C-alpha cells in the first residue's frame, strides 16, 4: 500500500542532508561576499 511506498525515515534523512547542504552553501556564499567586501575595503584604504 501507500505506507510501504512512502519511506518517511529515508525522506527525513534526505531532507536533512539537503538542509545541511543548503545551509553550507549559504554560509559559503556569505563568506565569499564578506571576503569580496573586505578586499574592496582594503583597496579603498590603499588608494588613500
Image (cartoon, rainbow, N blue to C red):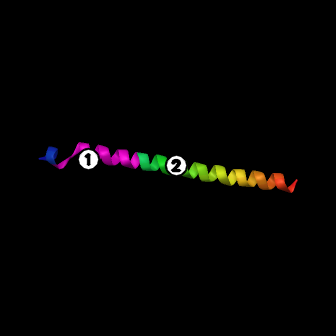
Q: Which residue is mark 1?
A: 10
Q: Are marks 1 and 2 in contact (CB under 8 Å)?
A: no
Q: Is residue 14 left or right of residue 21?
A: left
Q: How many marks?
A: 2
Give x and y (percent) for residue 6. Answer: 20, 47
Query: What residue is at 39 percent from the left and 49 percent from the top?
Result: 18
Query: What residue is at 45 percent from the left and 49 percent from the top?
Result: 22
Of 3 and 45, the residue lying toward us: 45
Neighbours of disc 2 within 10 Å: few (<14), some (14-19), many (20+): few
Magenta residues, dominant SS class: helix
Give x and y (percent) for residue 3. Answer: 15, 44
Query: What residue is at 71 percent from the left and 50 percent from the top?
Result: 38
Identify the element where label 2 is drawn. helix
Mark 1 to mark 2: distance in Å? 24 Å
Q: Is residue 12 left or right of residue 42?
A: left
Q: Tell me which label, 1 or 2, sits earlier in the chain.
A: 1
Q: Which mark is residue 26?
A: 2
Q: Is residue 39 magenta?
A: no
Q: Report the residue that reaches farthest toward the left.
A: 1
Give x and y (percent) for residue 9. Answer: 25, 43
Please provide the residue range marked out in magenta. 5-19
Neighbours of disc 1 within 10 Å: few (<14), some (14-19), many (20+): few
Give x and y (percent) for residue 33. Answer: 63, 52
Query: What residue is at 42 percent from the left and 46 percent from the top?
Result: 20
Q: Which mark is residue 33?
A: none
Identify the element where label 1 is drawn. helix
Q: Is residue 15 magenta?
A: yes
Residue 47 placement: quadrant: bottom right
Amino acid at each position: 500500500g501507500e505506507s510501504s511506498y512512502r519511506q518517511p525515515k529515508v525522506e527525513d534523512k534526505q531532507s536533512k542532508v539537503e538542509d545541511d547542504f543548503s545551509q553550507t552553501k549559504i554560509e559559503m556564499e556569505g563568506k565569499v561576499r564578506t571576503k569580496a567586501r573586505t578586499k574592496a575595503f582594503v583597496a579603498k584604504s590603499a588608494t588613500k
